[in-house]
Image: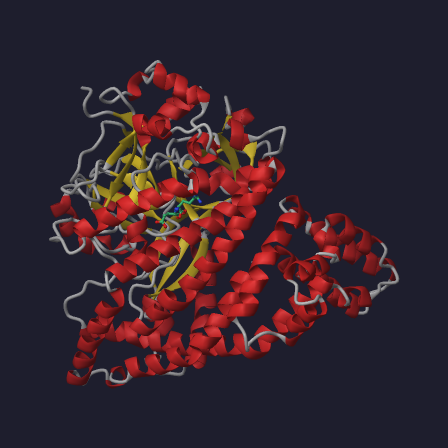
Amino acid sequence: MLKSSLFSSIIKTSVLLSFVGANCHVFAKEGMWLPPTLKSRETDMQKMGLEIPIEQIYNTSGTSLNNAVVLFGKGCTGEIISSKGLILTNHHCGYGTVQGLSSKEHDYFANGFWAQNNSEELPCGGLTVTFIRRMENVTDKITTGLTDTIPEADRNNIVNTRIKNLEKGYKVSSGLDATIKPYFNGNQYWVILSETYRDIRLVGFPPNGIGTFGGDTDNWSWPRHTGDFSMFRVYAGKNNKPADYSKDNKPYEAKEYFTLNISGYKEGDFTMVYGFPGTTNEYISSYQLNQIYSIIDPIRIEARTKRLNAWQEQMQKNREVFLKYTSKRAGVANGWKKWQGEVRGLKLNDALGKKQDYERNFQQWAITDNSLPYADDLLSQMAAKSLSINDILKTDEYFKEAVYGVELVQQASLLDKMLQVMRSGLNGSALKDSLIKLSKASGGFYKNYDAETDKHVFDVLMPLFMNKCAGRIPATFTKQYNEQGKNYSRWGDYVFSSIVASSEDIAHFADNSAAADSNKIKNDPAWILYNAANQYRSTYLTPNINRYYNDMAYLNRLYMNAQMQLDKHKIFYPDANLTLRLTYGKIDGIDPDGPAGYSYQTTLDGVIAKDNPDVDEFKVPQKLKELYTKKDYGRWAVNGTVPVAFIASNHTSGGNSGSPVLNAKGELIGTNFDRVWEGTMSDLYFDPNLCRNISLDIRYTLFIVEKFGNAGWLLKEMKIVNNKKK
Ligand code: ARG
Ligand code: GLU
């Protein structure tokens, strides 16, 4: 595994160098547009190939495509692909939910899951999907009468009250949920009118051999062969409205859903991605960019490398540990790899240098223009504030990634809650009941916890923390460490004698606590660590960091405003904030003219070429190999193979996973699931030469559903078109 990833990164380096600095021929389009503002992009989009009116993408009468895009769970996108509420999203977006439905007996990761009719669809407790019905610009209502430079705290008070009142009004008048969010760092506000459905059921989920094929080795990279999709269904109660789970609920009747176009695409074709990008910071100063680049990202990478190695070792030894940690590991590894790409991309592009150039221009505009007197010293203020917090930010990041990287330390918060209950004056059976309730509520944690694995993590992360944060270490940490002979493994043994290390111990404690002994908690080694970390952070770190971010929120709002007024060349779009956006670009290989032996598209042949029965990440399921051997592709055959994935130049971010990828007519040709590693810096700095989103070809999805999952019944409810067939 290591070898192959090393190899691929060497290839990538040479590919990368060959097009850095090359002429910017590409059509990549920076920007994540709010649907109601798309009209201003229409001409540009038409020039690039858009063939439908903007009103079909977004309008306020409930008939546009936004009604077929959902926020899936807490941070992914999904799309409706049938009139019966069928949702298509990524495999990795359904992963956590499917983990909850899986067991050793029902190992959906190993075997996949394919409902054969509605009654076999599995309820997913806790999962929700949200439809965005409408958005309105309410900036005037929120900011009227407020001067730009009013102190942030006063402004927040006024703004928050206005937001609450206005949301209430919108809820009443629309009968929908209403949320008001800031855009452009608080220079604009939009109300989002939405509906959240709560009865969601699992319909189809390929085994990991397809859905996570390539694993972390291939994650964030191109060429890619992951069948990263899963299917769910929205169920509705009376009148097609949201309802809690009930067996009487019916599949949601969707008026708007995507037509699937299976006739293919070619390089240069227009594409759009409609979804929920989570967080970008495109307009920050070089000082904040430098914090991410040289403090935050490197610490996260360093600590996670250690944590992941420790997990991996245990997961390989024991299938139960694998099942417990697979979802957690995927999440931790995902950021780990992304930040490596981000740091590298920022460096290769000299993003800091470019920001500094921009800031020199900005300073010039600010001094020349008299309309915004506060603009002149914004940058110097941001510089001073950023520099003074760097040391504290560094320590805090080590706390978050190293100390809290040990799950046991976090779990000791349970003891803290118990302690508070004990101190609240409850006693006897009332106290006992409360403690038992708390202990039971933590069941979910223990279901996915292995103390031995976590102890290995302790053994590698605590030395990191102690070494890197010398001078800023809580006294209690040093005391425990010294008492255990300055030996990390012994220290770990001691800490893991905690009663939160096992669900039995904590349950036993809760059960026998009628005469509660708070000393037992106060002497618990994990609680002591947890408490010391919290005390230290809340005394020396958090207040400073909060003050810093508050100050920066103020300065960044003014800086954003000033950039928008003074920069006459740029077209501004708001940073991502997990609200609905449309981005557009073109199907575009990453190195169309260079030496790379691959193009903008991958195929099933490439999947088979990567097959390696000895490596979990690259084990192709037997049945898929049989389909390949027999060339049993049905109508999904294209030039003797099946297309799998493609790349395009749409500006996407985390949260866009599962987003519909559309052609010029607004028909679905794929599902977004990743970006190329070299371009992940696009959250901070977008470079059209390097930034590509990766999508799963809808034909591979349908091929897997029909031929591999034998769930062809699902295709009957979809609207599938093929321009090539008359
Ligand atoms: N990189 C993709 C995203 O950011 C996919 C993550 C899931 N896959 C994985 N191997 N961790 O969400
Ligand atoms: N995989 C990401 C997600 O879950 C999308 C990739 C990206 O960050 O662009 O949102």
Decide which of 311, 425 is in the foreground and name it: 311
Residue 325 sits above or below residue 525 on the image: above
In this rendering, is residue 214 above or below 534? above
Residue 551 is left or right of residue 694, and the answer is right
Asked if residue 85 can be seen in this view, the reply is no
Q: Quadrant of residue 352?
A: bottom left
**Does residue 131 appear in this view?**
yes
Residue at left offset 60%, top offset 29%: 106
Q: Quadrant of residue 364?
A: bottom left
Where is residue 585 drawn, in percent x and y? 21, 47
User: How many numbered discs, if any?
Assistant: 0
Residue 388 location, quadrant: bottom left
Q: Is residue 553 above or below residue 447?
A: below
Q: What colour scheme governs how the chains and residues are painted in the rendered image of this protein?
A: secondary structure
**Residue under the point 57% across and 64% down:** 463
Percent position of residue 604, x then y = 32, 26
Q: Quadrant of the C terminus?
A: top left
Q: Position of residue 149 (x, y in %)?
A: 34, 83
Q: Residue at x 57, y 57 (%)?
A: 460
Q: Is residue 448 left or right of residue 328?
A: right
Quarter of the image for the N terminus: give it: top left
Answer with left or right where residue 339 lies relative to residue 13.
right
Q: Is residue 555 above or below residue 599?
A: below
Q: Residue at x 35, y 16 (%)?
A: 629
Where residue 89 sits: x, y (%)?
41, 38
**Camera-side residue of 506 and 515:** 506
Report the front residue among 447 and 84: 447
